[in-house]
Image (tube, rainbow, N blue to C red):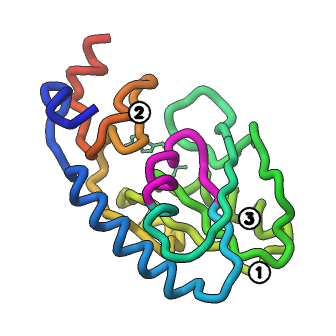
Amino acid sequence: MDIDDVRDDLSQVLYSREQIDERIRQIAAEVDRDYEGKDLLLVGVLNGAIMVMSDLSRALRSHCEMEWMAISSYGAGTASSGVVRILKDLSVDLVGRHVLIVEDIVDTGLTLAYLVENLRARGPASVEIMTAFRKPEAIKNKITVKYVGFDIPNQFVVGYGLDYAGKYRNMTGLGILDPKVYLQE
Ligand code: 5GP
């Protein structure tokens, strides 16, 4: 699905497919350089990270393994609590591995802070974070993200793996969802 297919649902288009593609390629080049000669394991967080994982891994010039985790925040609130439950865990041992967590978006970073701590306890050689998008809260909370695609405004965005009620995940670019879409429900 392209941005134009749902243009009326967006209050603003932030990034086109091409802009995202170009930025992910730049990051892949950095990752290639930084992890040269190292055994890289990409850990994607389901479901949002599917697009960025797919693009980043294919833009790399070197080998990488890919693993997935599924986590959910406790509680029904919309605000992130930082207390998370692992719904699907990794199927590999992390001892001595160089782990790069691949995320769609970092908002408060609370979910990620838990994940990093959890993975660090498993004895990896290193744990770093790559995210396609980052909101201002993450910067305020001083979450250390090694690779950031784009810093975006504090608005609810959809596309490139990010959904609203299960929809827009397959939209190619990134846009701000017009409040009329969720206020009319
Ligand atoms: P955090 O723990 O960093 O506050 O929460 C991060 C998670 O919240 C993301 O993985 C994503 O699932 C969700 N999230 C945060 N901001 C947005 C947004 O603007 N759009 C969508 N679709 N999900 C978001």
Kindly state the secondary structure of the residue where label 2 is placed: loop
Q: Amino acid at mark 3?
A: Glu
- Give the number of the mark in front: 3 or 2: 2
Decide if ligand 1 comes within 8 Å of the CB at mark 2: yes
Q: Which disc number belongs to residue 125?
A: 1
Residue at which label 2 appears: 163
Q: Earlier in the sequence, mark 3 or mark 1?
A: 3
Above or below, 76 against 93 in this view is above
Outermost residue to the top: 185
Q: Find residue 160 and report its horizontal and vertical position in percent.
A: 36, 44
**Which segment is the magenta one?**
43-55
Instruction: Work out whether residue 182 or residue 119 is closer to the camera in this orientation and state it.
Output: 119
Q: CA distance from mark 1 to mark 2?
A: 33 Å
Which numbered disc flags the more N-terminal residue, 3 or 2? 3
The quarter of the displayed image where residue 64 is located: bottom right
- Estimate how packed mark 2 is, as few (under 14), some (14 to 19) or many (20 or more) residues with alpha carbons within 10 Å: some
Quick one: quadrant of the N terminus?
top left
Three-letter amino acid code at the position of disc 1: Ala
Q: Is mark 3 within 8 Å of ligand 1?
A: no
**Horizontal side, residue 45 vs residue 91: left or right:** left
Q: Position of residue 131 (x, y in %)?
A: 46, 61
Q: What residue is shown at x 23% (from left), y 35% (from top)?
A: 2
Using a 10 Å C-alpha cutoff, classify the residue at mark 3 as few (fewer than 14 neighbours), some (14 to 19) or many (20 or more).
Answer: few
User: Which residue occupies 30% across, 21% down?
Assistant: 182
Where is 126 relative to 160, above or below? below
Q: Position of residue 19 (x, y in %)?
A: 22, 60
Q: Looking at the image, which residue is at 18% across and 27% down?
A: 5
Residue density around tag 1, few if under 14, some if 14–19, many if 20 or more, within 10 Å: few
- Asked if 123 appears above or below 104 in the picture, the reply is below
**Circle 1 sits in a helix, a strand or a loop, which is it?**
loop
